[in-house]
Amino acid sequence: MGSFAQVFVVAVVLAAVIVLYLLPSLVASNRRHERAGTILLLNVFFGWTFAAWVILLVWAFSSRPLRSP
């Protein structure tokens, strides 16, 4: 495998890991969660622990999304 291919694979894997890491924040934002900002901050600082990540993901799905005006 050439150098470009290796860099490309690493970039794709890194992007996938970042999206997975931020999944609770993305879910909260997409659902217009009333505490999406809080979920984002907690996800960034404590999401590296599996327990916090799971709790944040459940929290992101738990409440009803805000309705658009």
Image (tube, helix red, strand yellow):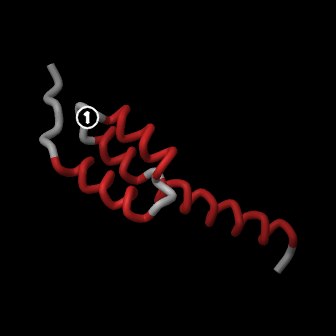
Front position in the image: 34 or 69? 34
What residue is at 59 percent from the left and 57 percent from the top? 15
Note whether 55 is above or below 3 in the view shown: above
Q: How far from the left and from the top, in percent, is residue 65? A: 17, 38
What residue is at 32 percent from the left and 48 percent from the top? 27
Residue 57, located in which quarter of the rendered image? bottom left
User: Which quarter shows the N terminus?
Assistant: bottom right
User: Which quarter shows the C terminus?
Assistant: top left
What is the secondary structure assignment of the residue under circle 1?
loop
What residue is at 87 percent from the left and 70 percent from the top? 3
Q: How far from the left and from the top, in percent, is residue 42? A: 42, 43
Q: How far from the left and from the top, in percent, is residue 41? A: 44, 38
**What residue is pinned by disc 1?**
32
Front position in the image: 24 or 13? 24
Kindly identify the amino acid type of the residue bearing the numbered disc 1. Arg
Q: How far from the left and from the top, in percent, is residue 34? A: 23, 31
Note whether 49 is above or below 6 in the view shown: above
Front position in the image: 36 or 51? 51
Residue 8, located in which quarter of the rendered image? bottom right
Q: Is residue 58 left or right of residue 12?
A: left
